[in-house]
C-alpha cells in the first residue's frame, strides 16, 4: 500500500507498506518538495510493483522500495504516465540519485 501525505499542493511525502508472511515491511519515506504532477502516482506505484516482482522475485522489501521509487519519480513528471527508466528508478532505490534535485530520502 502506498501512502501519501500532502504537506502542500506541491510538497508531498510518500512511503509504502506491505504486510507479508506475518511481517510488516516499510519502504523509506520520500520527501518530494517540488511536485510537478501527482496524477498517476498510484498507477506508477502499482506498475512499479508488478515490474519489481519480475526483477526481484525473492526480495519483497526490494519490490516495495522499487514501487515507491517509481511513484516518487512520477511526481516529477507532467501527465498521466511514468516515463522514468528502470535505470532511473534503480538509482532512487539504491540512493544513487542527485540528492539536491526534486526529492530526497528521509532516513
Image: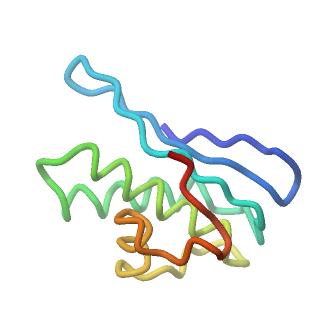
Compared to 23, does 96 lie above or below? below
Residue 18: quadrant of the picture: top left
Q: Nearer the viewer, residue 21 or 29?
A: 29
Q: Position of residue 103 (x, y in %)?
A: 63, 65
Q: Residue farthest to the top?
A: 22
Q: Which residue occupies 73% across, 78% down?
A: 78
The residue at the point 41 percent across, 35 percent down is 26
For the residue pair 22 and 102, the one nearer the viewer reads as 102
x 71%, y 62%: residue: 39
Residue extending farthest right? 9
Question: How far from the left and from the top, in percent, is residue 56?
Answer: 18, 58
Among the 4 quarters of the image, the one containing residue 73: bottom right
Q: Is residue 47 left or right of residue 100?
A: left
Q: Is residue 58 above or below residue 83?
A: above
Relative to 104, is 54 on the left or the right? left
Side of 34 where 56 appears, left or right: left
In this view, 18 is above or below 83: above
The residue shown at (47%, 61%) is 69
Identify the coloring.
rainbow
The residue sitting at the left extreme is 58
**Image position of 12 with respect to 33: above or below:** above
Q: Nearer the viewer, residue 11 or 100?
A: 100
- Count of numbered circles in the view: 0
**Residue 53, percent from left and from top:** 23, 55
The picture places residue 98, in percent across and down from the top left corner, at 54, 78
Amino acid at each position: 500500500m502506498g501512502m501519501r501525505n500532502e504537506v502542500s499542493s506541491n510538497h508531498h511525502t510518500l512511503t509504502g507498506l506491505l504486510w507479508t508472511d506475518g511481517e510488516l515491511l516499510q519502504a523509506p519515506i520520500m520527501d518530494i518538495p517540488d511536485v510537478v504532477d501527482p496524477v498517476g502516482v498510484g498507477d506508477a506505484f502499482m506498475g512499479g510493483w508488478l515490474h519489481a516482482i519480475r526483477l526481484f522475485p525473492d526480495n519483497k522489501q526490494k519490490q516495495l522500495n522499487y514501487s515507491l521509487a517509481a511513484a516518487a519519480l512520477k511526481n516529477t513528471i507532467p501527465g498521466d504516465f511514468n516515463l522514468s527508466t528502470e535505470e532511473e528508478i534503480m538509482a532512487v532505490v539504491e540512493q544513487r540519485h542527485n540528492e539536491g534535485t526534486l526529492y530526497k530520502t528521509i532516513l
